[in-house]
Image: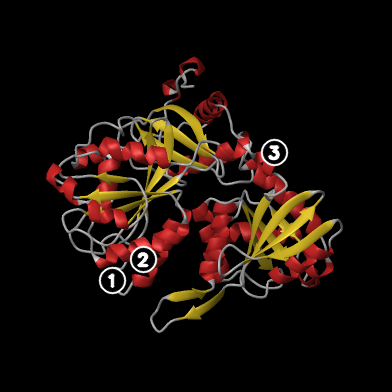
Amino acid sequence: MPVPKVVIVGRPNVGKSSLLNWLSRKRISVVEPTAGVTRDRVTYLMHEEDRYFELVDTGGIGIVDSDDLGADIERQINTGIDEADLILFVVDGKAGQVPLDCEVARRLRPLGKPVVLVVNKCDSPKLDQEVGEFYELVDAPLVCTSVLGERNRDKLMSAIVKGLPRREEGEEDEGQSLKADPELKIAIVGRRNVGKSTFINALAQTERMIVSEIAGTTRDSVDVRFELDGKSFVAIDTPGVRKKKSLANDIEFYGLTRALRSIRRANLVLMFFDAAETISGVDKKLVGEIIDEYKPCIFVVNKWDLGQEKGMTTEKWAQYLFDEFPRLRFVPVAFITAKDDVNIKKLINLSQTIAKQAQIRVPTARINEVLRAAILANHPPLRSARQARIYFGTQVAVEPPTIVLKCNDAQLIDRSWQRYLQGVFHEELPFPEVPIKVHYRSRGAAEEYAGDEAEDEEAGIVFTGDQPIEVDPADIVDDDELPE
């Protein structure tokens, strides 16, 4: 299962960012009394009671942004809520219940997701006796906290761990639910007129496939269930994304929200391109979202008959894609002609293979064997006369494969060497064609929170994707010293 996401929500100025810093024991989010400081989602990898989870800070719900970025902030909040496995609903114990708290509660109730109600700013135990009014907001466990007074952090952490999805929850019932649950959820995204609907229609015509249209789980998409070789699949069909210029200089994408929801819900994404057209800004935007979500992906070049008429070859088109998207050179490329049912079944079979890669777990000993060899083959240089040290690496989650590297200081960064290490992981681990999420964790990240810049540089901050560290091979522990 993926690393669970615990998302902090609430109206402005209830202390959401302070709560993230307090729980993580690091200064991650900017904390200011001015409403609206937090706009983008801020994420920190937590490890508590033998569970890993991502703590996510979001902007205040209902904020009127001074820079007219309210729609962008709202989109970030929606993304956080959609992805959440557990929601921390934060309110202000000093101010008491206000109408905007009720609005947040109305927004959360229909979701059916587990919630912990956090009554923050209860600096004195006396305020704990005055929180009864908050119980009417949501039916959820309530914890009174005070960042300033260091009150009930352990109690809140226990409530969070208790509310996380049970580890490997779906595996026990997989055999019983196999007939009801799809083998794979495939998001089909791309700009308009690249042939997504034609591809969906082709599923009904391919040999040994049965297709039926069912209601989607979002307002903006339709789930198409089909069967192939006795296995059930769901194709998440969305309208094409098109570009729309606003009155300002920013470019907005009509229908982008629908595509993003499809990407988040899917196990794998089919990113469609038109063989007769060049790659557009809309294509780059969608691929960027796929990268951000760490979703397994296949580049699908449709209308290949037209591409061949223009003298294109598969090698030229694949190189064109990799030149445009160098971070995804590991992604497989498929060439189809949906209107003629060419290579449709092969594409579905390839999708199964790629999705299974994202579900593989690699033993810690193997990860460290690959890590050791990578360092010996290409030792990174010193940085600022300091040498980073990796103590061990271990895989903590699947979908996407997530690896945590414990080191002495994660801020000793060498980007080119990190890209090299990512390449080694793709070549040597059983994840050659899926994204790998790598977290660099400094030793002492869970030590007592100090709050000054020197302690911040101990780097409990998560570095993901393109930020490496320097390593001394002698500092990788032996297999018999690795944690279980």
Q: Earlier in the sequence, mark 1 or mark 3?
A: 1
Residue 287: which quarter of the image? bottom right
Identify the disc placed on residue 73. Answer: 2
Name which residue lies at 57% across and 56% down: 265
Residue 380: which quarter of the image? top left
Amino acid type of the residue tagged 2 in the rendering: Ile
Mark 2 closeness class: few <14, some 14–19, many ≥20 residues within 10 Å: many
Q: Verify CB contact (< 8 Å) between mark 1 and mark 2.
A: yes
Q: Where is residue 110 in the image (x, y as percent from the top left)?
A: 45, 61
**Does dot 2 land on a helix, a strand or a loop?**
helix
Q: In this view, does 277 lie to the left or right of 399?
A: right
**Marks 1/2: CA–CA distance:** 8 Å
Name which residue lies at 81% across and 48% down: 230
Q: Name the residue under label 1.
A: 65
**Marks 2/3: CA–CA distance:** 41 Å
Residues 134 and 454: in front is 134
Image height check: is 179 above or below 246? above
